[in-house]
Image (cartoon, rainbow, N blue to C red):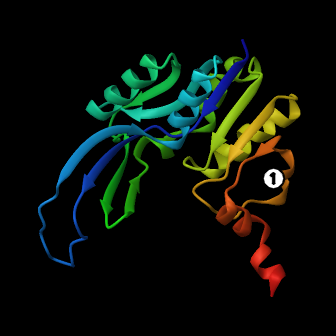
């Protein structure tokens, strides 16, 4: 069984359905509300676990109800969470999602996801160096992503980077990643393909 380490985001999604979006200052009655687990990192870990991999997670949550909810979900999906740190004084990351008129609007508050430090990575370096593959996304700070990719590159550990949410990435980082998984929009942003068409 391959050993996979996912480093990244753990969120709780607050999902509201409404017939139409409210105007500024307007209050509307919604039709449905759900609290569900999310975060691109957590989703990657669960997908890997369902492919019969040995998956460990490195990340941060707040020492709060949302953090407990998210960690229970990871455990239920056979993710090892020894590398997840509970932090006092900071909330677990959330995504506030409004579903309306066949589309969605999302506000993400990263919370504890932006508190992952190089010290956290160093604390779990043994776990990292034993991995067959390390999976990342862009819902944590860029300097942590660059730090982890550099460690993996120097130690011949394969990496997958999902470049979402879309942002500019340095060619140095792109060249060190084993597998990059952009969608069309992310590809255009990273490689400036629209500029080339002009």
Of residue 113 and residue 190, the one placed in the foreground of this image is 190
Q: Position of residue 65 (x, y in %)?
A: 26, 31
Query: What percent of the width, then of the height, locates residue 143?
Result: 66, 49
In this rendering, the answer to whether 98 lies above or below 148 is below
Q: Is residue 146 left or right of residue 21?
A: right
Which residue occupies the extreme front position in the image?
A: 102
Instruction: Say above or below: 66 vs 187.
Output: above
Closest to the observer, 156 or 3: 3
On the image, the x and y values in percent for residue 85 come to 46, 27
Mark 1, residue position? 174
The total of numbered circles placed on residues is 1
Q: Tell me: 137 left or right of 77.
A: right
Quarter of the picture holding the N terminus: top right
Q: Quadrant of the C terminus?
A: bottom right
Residue situated furthest bottom in the rendering: 198
Q: Residue at x 35, y 41 (%)?
A: 90
Q: Quadrant of residue 144?
A: top right
> Going 38% across and 62% down the picture, which residue do you hit?
104
Residue 129 pos. (x, y %):
76, 21
Q: Residue at x 58, y 22 (%)?
A: 49
Badge 1: residue crowd in 10 Å (few <14, some 14–19, many ≥20): some
Instruction: Identify the residue at image location x=40%, y=25%.
Output: 73
Q: In terms of image quadrants, where is residue 62?
A: top left
Q: Secondary structure at mark 1?
A: helix
């Amino acid at each position: 069984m391959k050993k996979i380490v996912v480093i990244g985001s753990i969120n709780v999604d607050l999902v509201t359905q409404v017939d139409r979006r409210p105007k500024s200052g307007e209050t509307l009655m919604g039709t449905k509300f759900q609290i569900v687990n999310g975060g691109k990192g957590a989703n990657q870990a669960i997908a890997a676990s369902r492919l019969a991999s040995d998956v460990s997670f490195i990340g941060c949550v707040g020492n709060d109800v949302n953090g407990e909810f998210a960690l229970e979900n990871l455990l239920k999906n056979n993710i090892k969470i020894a590398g997840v740190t509970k932090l006092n004084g900071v909330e677990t990351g959330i995504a506030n999602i409004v579903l309306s008129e066949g589309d969605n609007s999302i506000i993400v508050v990263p919370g504890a996801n932006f508190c992952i430090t190089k010290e956290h990575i160093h604390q779990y370096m043994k776990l990292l160096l034993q991995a067959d593959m390390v999976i990342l996304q862009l819902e944590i700070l860029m300097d942590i992503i660059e730090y982890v990719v550099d460690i993996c590159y120097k130690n011949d550990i394969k990496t997958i980077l999902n470049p979402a949410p879309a942002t500019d990435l340095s060619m140095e980082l792109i060249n060190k990643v084993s597998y990059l998984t952009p969608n069309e929009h992310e590809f255009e942003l990273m490689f400036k393909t629209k500029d080339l068409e002009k």
